[in-house]
Amino acid sequence: MRRRTTAAIATAAALCATAALAGCGSGSGSGSSSKKTVNTWVYPVINDPKANDAYWDGLVKGFEKANPGITVKVSTYPWANRDTALTTALAAGKGPDVAYLIPDQLPAYQRNLIPADQWMTAQDRSALRPSALKAVTVDGKPYAAPVLMSTYPMLCDKKVFDAIGETSYPTTWDQLAALAPKLKAKGFYATSYSGDTTATLNMTFYPLLWQAGGDVFSSDGTKAAFNSDAGVKALTWLKTFVDNGWTPKDLITTTPQIEQTDLAKNKVACTWQNTAAEVEPFWGKDNIVVGPALTGRSAAAYGTVGTLAMFKSANKDAAGKWISYVTQPANSAGLQKPGGYFPPRTDATPLYPGDQHQEATEKVLESTDVGPLNKASRDVMGVLAPQLQAALLGKSSPKKALDDAAQAADQIIARKR
């Protein structure tokens, strides 16, 4: 199996890199290639390079033994600048047959991909968690095979609750808001919210928007929808926490290292923006209470889904067999467990038996949303985040901030279509 790192490709190809997102350079093939080599690009989901190589080497050997005549080559690339490298390679006709993508990349590469309903087996599809299938579905079609999942549940610090004499933990907006004055009186914050414009809204504001019953885009993806009544309700609820000192106000404009935050100092009761592994060094394992997704009108949490997608250069039969092989629970477990991820399939054996934090976290997967799958998603965040911050700082009303952001977002969406 071959290993390589990202290299520069011809300058002429780079001129077409942007167009590659719209289908340039990948060829117009439909997956009917006669080649039996499956070139696969992955990224270091397993942080240890030796363990990463050993994992993929083992899978390739097992697959090639079971599928004589098909050769698989796996190349591990760095996370940094991965879209630039991929689009440039596609523009030069040197892209992969299969690549590890996250859901918000699927709309961007949609014209380069073979829809998964053309190569995913019925058995593999029926085994997927509904939330995992939703995470790879663009314009009504699945475009990749989920291979791992994560989620950000509501976490509460038992040490804080012990300090105020509380033994029950909030699971709804109303419960958290009702508890906030008591926490403040004892020198604690109810939650911490990162309003820094560099923070991803998938982890910060969007969960509140979903919990209020709203969404980022209209159902047809042609307009912004976050300035709905639900959006105003979510932002107003959050602003109440800022105005009343129920969340650290400095975090609205800055993002310090976690060890420098009130969260790390056991001054924050609950968070939906961190994992148990992130807070454990500061709270201690025994003080972490993993709850369900926070509920407003409905329960919702942000999470990630890692996928394998097939490009048009691939032989559908060979690449489809390879992806199906990797995503079988017995094979994907070795990719999931080192990073604390979860299987996206319902037929998988539990990976963390006896680990109460992971078992509780896994229950939140069905309430998990990966964020909007729209070509304009990242650009829309760029115009929405400053307006959210302005509202939280009292420089704009929630309604005006969302309306102003929606006006700018609609122009971006129109250009992206």
Image: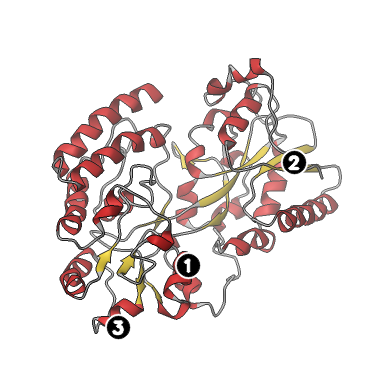
Mark toward the start of the polypeptide (1 vs 3): 3
Check disc 3 and give the amino acid type: Asp
Q: Name the residue under label 1.
A: 362
Q: Mark 3 points at which residue?
A: 162
Helix, strand or loop for disc 1:
helix
Element marked by disc 3:
helix
Indicate the quadrant where residue 257 lies. bottom left
Residue ID at (58%, 18%): 16
Q: Name the residue under label 2.
A: 318
Rounded to the nearest angstrom, the CA distance separating label 2 from label 3 is: 57 Å
In the image, residue 364 lies at what x, y percent?
Answer: 42, 65
Give the answer, above or below, for where 94 lies relative to 37: above
Give the distance between the C-alpha atoms of the residues marked 1 and 3, in whole angstroms. Answer: 26 Å
Q: Residues within 10 Å of mark 1 (few under 14, many from 20)?
A: many
Image position, residue 102 (x, y; %): 53, 44
* Amino acid at circle 2: Ala
Q: Where is residue 75 in the image (x, y as percent from the top left)?
A: 73, 42
